[in-house]
Amino acid sequence: MKVVVGLSGGVDSSVTAYLLQQQGHEVVALFMRNWNDASVTLEDECPWIEDSNDALMVAQKLGIPFQVIDMSELYKERIVDYMFDEYQRGRTPNPDVLCNREVKFDVFMKTALSLGADKVATGHYARVDSTVDENGKKIFHLLAGKDNNKDQSYFLCQLSQDQLSKALFPIGELTKPQVREIAKEIGLVTADKKDSQGLCFIGKVSLPQFLQQQLTPKEGEIVEIFKDSPLFSMEIPDFSSKEEELEFLSQKINYKKTDGKMIGKHQGAQFFTIGQSKGLGIGGHKESCFIISRDMDNNIIFVGEGHSFPGLHKKALKIDNSELHWVREDLRLKNGSSMNVMARFRYRQELQKATIYQFENAFYMEFDEPQSAIAEGQFAAWYIEDELLGSGVIA
């Protein structure tokens, strides 16, 4: 079988290529150049050229063809512009999830297939399996990686059955230490290379630094809301339906400046996210202050003190039907039905017990325990055991 590997210059994709070669496949390596703007890349730390060179050296070591493809215009259009737009709207996008849906398993995959590939492989810590239903149709299953500490199935939560049918994740059965050990044994240059901590499209550059070079700073106020605010002691109304209750539980509180006290200034609400405590420059509190809301129209950040601050927690979240995606289309909920699942809305978040509900107007996720820092724009994903069934953008 001919397999194109997205060789990134890191140890995970390097070992992916090696394992496929050992399995007897015809392996071709493609390196994606995703970002051309050197003004926001820390060139002395991790330029794309260094990653490209490492990928080339791995390909040469394994004796497989290597090619660089420039996808920077596509990245800017589908990922970067989208991300800036989301932050300006006061939402918290996940560029890595978008990167997999829009680039790696869309345009990159189509490019690979046009080169005659049967499958596309990446160095994700995830697994894909398949079964045949009673009608003889093949169903693909997106499974968590065996390494619980590195499982990346969440980043793949927007993939379709068609994309999974052509995807391979060879290191999904391994742990990170095992991957590094294999790389050392065969003498790959990437064996001890640190994991990339940056954004998926620009390498090692911090998100705040990147945003500040692209979005205009504007001074605004930081307003503290207090635990004894009457906003948190409102009587819970009687609900005529489960949908009405979920709508109430998932809605955000619209704070006003007069609800609290101004305690500081910031340089732009678009640079911050719900649940953030660092970078606010707030002192004089026993516990850290966390962002509980942002008023984008008036450029105000609202904060509350402590991890247990009531405005930081919610019992439910809402997903518009237009933003709903089922990896397992055959399990899609019908209107009025529900399902018990395990769920997360952040990478590395421990899976939480939840129930999902489908209604004609929207989709809801209700957690057994209130969850901290649910932010609009994040992807919520749901699982049964180790299989990821679907995901959606939080409204």
Image (cartoon, rainbow, N blue to C red):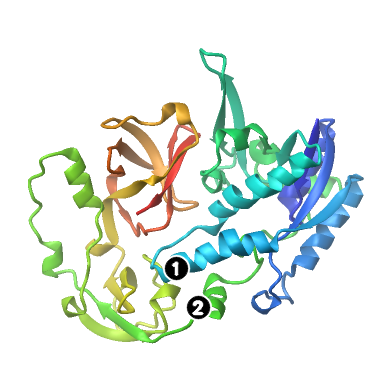
Task: Compare marks 2 and 1 and give the one earlier in the sequence.
Answer: 1
Amino acid type assigned to the residue bearing label 1 in the image? Tyr
Q: Is residue 251 above or below residue 321?
A: below
Callout 1: few (<14), some (14-19), or many (20+) C-alpha neighbours within 10 Å? many
Q: Is residue 214 above or below residue 177?
A: below
Instruction: Give the label on residue 36, or none.
Output: none
Tell me residue 393's x, y (percent). Answer: 41, 51
User: From where the camera sits, is residue 188 visible?
Assistant: no
In the displayed structure, does residue 274 sit left or right of residue 203?
left
In which quarter of the view is residue 78 placed? bottom right
Question: In 3D space, how far apart are the residues under numbered discs 2 and 1 (Cα atoms)?
Answer: 9 Å
- Mark 2 and mark 1 in contact? Answer it, CB < 8 Å: yes
Q: Is residue 257 above or below residue 255?
A: below
Q: SS at mark 2?
A: loop
**Quarter occupied by the N terminus:** top right
In the displayed structure, does residue 52 sit left or right of residue 205?
right
Callout 2: few (<14), some (14-19), or many (20+) C-alpha neighbours within 10 Å? some
Residue shown at 33% from the left, 31% from the top: 339
Amino acid type assigned to the residue bearing label 2 in the image? Leu
Q: Which residue is mark 1?
A: 87
Q: SS at mark 1?
A: helix
**Quarter occupied by the C terminus:** bottom left
Residue shown at 10% from the left, 62% from the top: 233
Tell me residue 247's x, y (percent). Answer: 22, 49
Tell me residue 215's x, y (percent). Answer: 50, 78
Tell me residue 274's x, y (percent). Answer: 37, 65
Q: Which residue is mark 2?
A: 215
In which quarter of the view is residue 185 placed? top right
The foreground one among 228 and 112 is: 112
